[in-house]
Amino acid sequence: SQKIEQNSEALNIQEGKTATLTCNYTNYSPAYLQWYRQDPGRGPVFLLLIRENEKEKRKERLKVTFDTTLKQSLFHITASQPADSATYLCALETNGFQKLVFGTGTRLLVSP
Amino acid sequence: NAGVTQTPKFRVLKTGQSMTLLCAQDMNHEYMYWYRQDPGMGLRLIHYSVGEGTTAKGEVPDGYNVSRLKKQNFLLGLESAAPSQTSVYFCASREEGRKQFFGPGTRLTVL
C-alpha cells in the first residue's frame, strides 16, 4: 500500500542547532515533493518544492533534499529559532495527478 | 489580496442537518481543493476542481458534495451530517507552479 511517513513524535532541539525532519514514502513515484509549515489553529503555509530530478533545494535557512532511490526527503532548518516551532508537513505529487498527498506531519519544538 | 478565505470559521451541527462551506480565492487560480484534517490522520483530500464547472473525487469523498460554478468559489456541502464528519476543513487553491495556498480552516462539530 502507499504510505508517507513522518515522525509522529515531536522533535525537541535547542535554539541555534540544526533541525532535521524526515519524510519517507513507499509505493509512490513522486514527480514533486513539497514541504509546508502549519501553526496551531491555522492553515498550512508553503515552504519549498523540489522536483524528482533535483537533489537539493535551499531557501534562506531551509534546505530540502530528495533521494528517489532511498524514497526519502530530508528537511533542514539551520540556526533554528523558537519562532520555527510548528508542525511541518511533507506532501507528494505524482505526475499528472494534479493533487497532493500529505504526510501526518512532525511537530518541531525549538527551546531558547 | 485576501488570498483564500473560508466561511464560516466555526459551526456546530446536529446529526442529519445539512450545511455548505464556502471557499473563495482572489488569485485567479484554476485548481481548488477541499481537505479535512483529523488528529493523527493528516490532511486528506475530499474533492477537488481543475477549473470552473469541474469537480473530481479525492481520497475521502463519501458524504460530501461540491460545486464550482464560479472560478473564484468552491463550495463543500454536507447533505446529512454525521458525527464522523467532525473535523477541521481546509480549502486550498493552487498556482501554476504547484504551490498551494490554504485558507484559515472551518472547525465543524457534529453532535
Image (cartoon, rainbow, N blue to C red):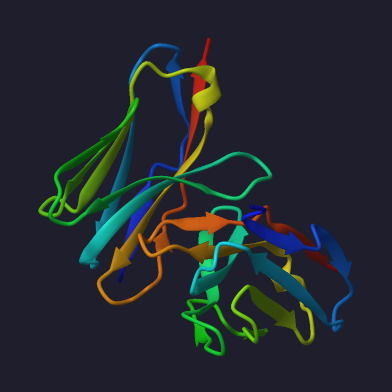
Quadrant of image for the N terminus of chain A? bottom left
Q: Is residue A93 visible?
A: yes
The residue at 19%/54% (across/down) is A71
Question: Residue at position x 65%, y 40% from top?
Answer: A40
**Furthest residue toward bottom:** B53
Tell me: B1 left or right of A29. right
> On screen, A99 above or below B66?
above
Residue B83 in percent (x, y) is at 77, 72
Is residue A23 toward the left or the right of residue B84 in the image? Answer: left
Q: Quadrant of residue A22?
A: top left
Percent across and percent down for residue A94 are 27, 69
Number of numbered callouts drawn: 0
Task: Give me the residue at 32% from left, 65% from top.
Answer: A93
In this orientation, which residue lies closer to the viewer: A11 or B102? B102
In screen coordinates, is B35 left or right of A13? right
Residue B39 at x, y = what percent? Answer: 60, 53
In the displayed structure, B77 sits above or below B35; it is below
Residue A67 relative to residue B81: left or right: left
In which image quadrant can residue B69 be found? bottom right
Q: Nearer the viewer, residue B41 or B10?
A: B10
Q: Is residue B41 visible?
A: no
Position of residue A63 measured from the top left corner of the image (x, y, whole percent): 28, 33
Q: Residue at x 56, y 90 (%)?
A: B53
**Residue farthest to the left, as pictured:** A69
